Amino acid sequence: MPDWLQNNANLISAASSVAMLAVWVIYLQVFLGGYRRQVRAKIVITRAVGRTLAAHCFISNMSSQAIYLEAVIVTLEGDDYRISVRVTDFDPAEAERPSDPRRETHQGPLHSGDQTWIGTFDTLIARAADSQGVTPGDFTASGRTIAIEVMVVADYLSEDLVVGAKRRFVAEWRGDTWVVSPQTIQTEQIRSRRARRRLTRLLADDSEQDA
């Protein structure tokens, strides 16, 4: 055995070097994977304080760094309609105009661990109805299911493209009241570069319309 080891010392040394390199490569991949998960953006969209249309919708920043909210877009879907409306800014009809303009919009920085309230689900439906020149009752009177998708677009320090997240809720008429339920357990993070480019184009298109 010692003679075999001596005769194959170079081979054993090379195999040991390859094995050590493989261990370091695996370690580096695990480290980089953990680092990417730690620094990438994570936005959470939740329903809170009840389950009816009076329940509140919150956006929370669970990233390790601050994000800058660019837009909040709500989409309503029914059997024969699909309506998207921005709810980034407060409707002057919903509240008195504050002296500080920063209190009129959700646009702005949201620090790590912070959250912002974007309204109740019935006010989100009302905003969509108002954008179409109709009343909220046009959506709720029939008692048919309403899909409510909330999408967030934001800037993040470590990303060269905007980041995003969305979550879909369903409002159903049960017995004598509307019940709002999330369709997914967690908020869907928009991570692919193709989808994030679409979000960037969406913001650019809206900026051109505002110009």
Image (spheres, helix red, strand yellow):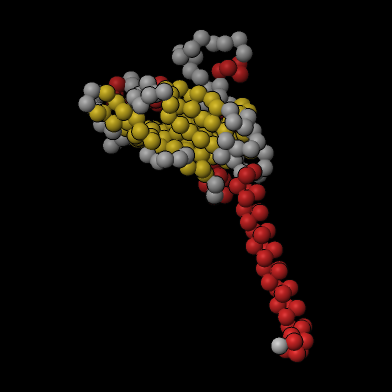
Residue drawn at x 46%, y 31% as measured from the top left: 46
Q: Is residue 201 visible?
A: no
Residue 179 occupies quadrant: top left
Quadrant including the N terminus: bottom right
Residue drawn at x 54%, y 36% as measured from the top left: 43
96 to 161, vertically: above or below: above
Quadrant including the C terminus: top right
Q: Is residue 194 visible?
A: yes
User: Which residue ends up furthest to the front in the rendered image?
Assistant: 1
Residue 31 occupies quadrant: bottom right
Tell me: 113 left or right of 10. left
Number of labelled discs?
0
Residue drawn at x 71%, y 68% as measured from the top left: 21
Residue 153 location (% of width, % of height): 55, 36
Residue drawn at x 73%, y 83% as measured from the top left: 11
Considering depth in this image, is 85 or 21 the residue closer to the camera?
Answer: 21
Considering depth in this image, is 112 or 192 the residue closer to the camera?
Answer: 112
Considering depth in this image, is 154 or 131 the residue closer to the camera?
Answer: 154
Tell me: 162 left or right of 8. left
Residue 70 location (% of width, % of height): 58, 31
62 to 126, vertically: above or below: below
45 to 6, vertically: above or below: above
19 to 205, vertically: above or below: below
Residue 20 location (% of width, % of height): 71, 69
Tell me: 7 left or right of 197. right
Residue 183 location (% of width, % of height): 37, 39
Residue 78 occupies quadrant: top left
